[in-house]
Amino acid sequence: MNEKSSIVISGSGLWTPENTISNEELVNAYNQYAEKYNNDNAADIERGELAAKPLSSAEFIAKASGIKSRFAYRKDGILDVNRMRPKIEVRNNDELSHQAEMALKAARIALKEANKSPEDIDAVIVSCAYTQRPYPAIAIEVQNELGIKGFGFDMLVACSAATFALQRAYEMVAAGTAKCVLTINPELTSPQVNYCDRDSHFIFGDVATATVIEHADSCTSEHSYDIVNTKAVTSFSNNIRSDFSYVSHADDTEPFAADRLFHQEGRKVFKEVCPMAANHIATQLESQGIEVSSVKRWWLHQANINMNTLITKKLLGRDPQPEEAPIVLDRYANTASAGSLIAFNLHHKDLVSGDIGLICSFGAGYSIGSLVLRKR
Ligand code: CO8
């Protein structure tokens, strides 16, 4: 693809909720809940009919995952031992939905960064791990709110929703079915977290990211990136699952049972996904004739600091410098698909023309999505 016809990321936006929850706060609430549960069920636990809830630890969380804190769209309820889930107020149909509100906040920042107004956009993709309703699409609600002509749709690819959406946007611009695409990732993860589960209560945070993709010849933004190459792969695994489903209405199962919320075999995921991701990236770079050592920035999925260190070490043959592969999960935790784009948002403006960077997501599905970028 020559410079004239290249397709670019021309702007991006990050919206961070105001509420933070530290490991200590979260562990304190979980441990109070676990002790109450164990007391309330002492007889059954004693008889071996029920398993006691083990206690959580802030030190374990920081060491095993790199997570120290997370943001919450609504903090109310999460730390309430009698609730253990966020309390999100109901909105009427004539009010903006929660997820559209999050999406709009990130979208407006991305449009400004890309030097674009809503009239310039002709397609909106909302892509994330969950949407708060199946239809009408959140993307169409956002489109309506911004006054964008054209079309919008929602798509779900769990951890890889953001990178897969960027790839679809790239293909739409390349095919000429859209001129300028707004992709948005309103990751409202907290309603799907099982805050009563010691192994996963700490993993997720809420956030929204957005990105503008267009032809280089219409791009007027200060910081833009040629999309040099895109690559996606999926491989079925039951190791990360959420079975939350409309079918619960018909199959007489409990709609909010533990298996309906996020759950995983974290160790297996770690072992299987790291080599997959490293191999995926190495193969992609090789196909483009790009040396691993010439990649200036690795904007990687943010699920676990040890995964990111292992993947970059496999690629580079050494530990990465902090600025080479920025980690944001200490503050943001795992934000489903948005992690790599938070890293991009916070750590790209120092790159200079010609610098190569790589965005890569990996996780549930399994799914891996990556984009090689070159600063213009
Ligand atoms: N406090 C204290 N101890 C704990 C805790 C805790 N909170 N949790 C576990 N332990 C204990 C375990 O019980 C175990 O004890 P024992 O050795 O006695 O059995 C010990 O600590 C070690 O446990 P693990 O082996 O599970 O611990 P790990 O070192 O493997 O760390 C992790 C656990 C952090 C979960 C790690 O396995 C990991 O990060 N794996 C990869 C995870 C991953 O990438 N997951 C993908 C996430 S999915 C995604 O990104 C998007 C999904 C869609 C969005 C969903 C939105 C809600």
Image (spheres, helix red, strand yellow):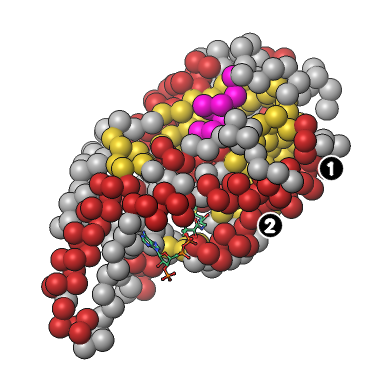
167 shown above or below 225 = below
| Circle 2 SS class | helix
| Viewer-nearest of discs 1 and 2 | 2
Quarter-wise, where is residue 176 in the image? top right
User: Which part of the image, by quadrant, shows the N terminus?
Assistant: top right
Q: Is residue 267 magenta?
A: no
Circle number at residue 275: 2
Horizontal and vertical percent position of residue 132: 37, 46
Look at 78% across and 31% down and name the residue there: 294
* Residue behind mark 1: 287
Q: Nearer the viewer, residue 333 or 306?
A: 306
Look at 44% across and 21% down and name the residue there: 108
User: Which mark is first along the chain, 2 or 1?
Assistant: 2
Say whether mark 1 is within 8 Å of ligand 1: no
- In this orientation, does residue 176 appear? no
Assign ligand 1 to one image quadrant. Answer: bottom left
- In this orientation, does residue 253 appear? yes
How would you classify the magenta stretch by its main secondary structure? helix
